[in-house]
């Protein structure tokens, strides 16, 4: 059936045999079977037609005739990007694993016992790290100095926040100057052999690697 738009002009009429696709339907292109998957609309595109170009009297010369510009817009939903990253980087109930580019901090220092006073020295050391003359951690290192909370509570908080790197100042730090490093980073293949070249007591699972570093 035909219809009219707001300007009174006839719009295009499309007729067909419409069907709401569902899992198990046969694909009309390849004869395969459709599968259903959950998704998040991170970005969107809208066709605006000449709604705004008419209002602005914006036109171009096309094939000898002056026509209104056809317009469109697109956008990225910032909050939806965070939702998608959180869903894709969740660690099976063990908190988040933010990509470094959007992590709230890159490093969390957790001092235990009497090591609280030395946490500042470790903070300054990490904050000053440079690669090719450029600081890589500056402004992205935090110290969890809530010494009224247990070690497990603070380490669990670091996991929930999705901090990629947790540096624990435990008994080995007081005795041997070694820190425990917990690496949680999505999209990275953590190879035990590579980490063992720089650290000791390396343990890895599907979601993180732990090691002791001098």
Image (cartoon, rainbow, N blue to C red):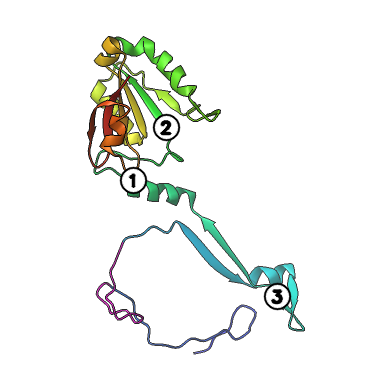
Number of the label disc, if any, that sits on residue 68: 3
In this rendering, is residue 121 above or below 95?
A: above
In this rendering, is residue 177 above or below 73?
A: above
Determine the image quadrant of residue 166. Answer: top left
Q: Which residue is mark 2?
A: 106
Q: Magenta segment range?
A: 23-37
Number of the label disc, if any, that sits on residue 33: none
Residue 57 percent location from the top left of the image: 75, 70
Tag 3 secondary structure: strand
Residue 206 percent location from the top left of the image: 24, 42
In the rendered image, is residue 156 in sight? no
Please identify the quadrant where the C terminus is shown: top left
In this rendering, is residue 210 above or below 169?
A: below
Q: Which residue is mark 1?
A: 89
In this rendering, is residue 61 above or below 74?
A: below
Is the stretch drawn in magenta largely helix, strand or loop? Answer: loop
Q: CA distance from mark 2 to mark 1?
A: 15 Å
Is 71 on the left-hand or right-hand side of 199?
right
Question: Disc count in the image?
Answer: 3
Of residues 145 and 6, the one drawn nearer to the viewer in this rendering: 145
Would you say the residues marked 2 and 1 are in contact, meaning their CB atoms lie under 8 Å apart? no
Pointer 1 local density, CA inside 10 Å: few below 14, some 14–19, many at least 20: many
Q: Residue at x 65, y 79 (%)?
A: 7
Residue 131 percent location from the top left of the image: 50, 30
């Amino acid at each position: 059936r035909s219809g009219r738009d707001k300007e009174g002009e006839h719009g295009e009429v499309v007729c067909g045999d419409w069907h709401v696709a569902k899992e198990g339907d046969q694909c009309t292109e390849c004869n395969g079977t459709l599968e259903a998957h959950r998704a998040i609309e991170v970005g969107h595109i809208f066709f605006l037609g000449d709604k705004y170009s008419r209002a602005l009297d914006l036109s171009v010369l096309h094939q000898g005739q002056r026509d209104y510009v056809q317009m469109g817009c697109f956008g990225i939903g910032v909050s939806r990007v965070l939702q998608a990253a959180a869903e894709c980087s969740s660690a099976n109930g063990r908190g988040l694993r933010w990509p470094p580019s959007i992590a709230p901090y890159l490093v969390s220092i957790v001092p235990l016992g009497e090591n609280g006073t030395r946490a500042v020295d470790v903070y300054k050391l990490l904050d000053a790290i440079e690669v090719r003359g450029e600081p890589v951690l500056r402004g992205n290192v935090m110290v969890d100095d809530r010494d009224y909370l247990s070690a497990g509570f603070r380490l669990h908080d670091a996991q929930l926040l999705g901090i990629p790197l947790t540096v624990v100042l435990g008994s080995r730090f007081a005795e041997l100057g070694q820190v425990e490093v917990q690496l949680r980073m999505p999209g990275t293949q953590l190879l035990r052999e590579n980490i063992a070249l720089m650290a000791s007591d390396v343990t890895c699972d599907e979601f993180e690697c732990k090691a002791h570093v001098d």
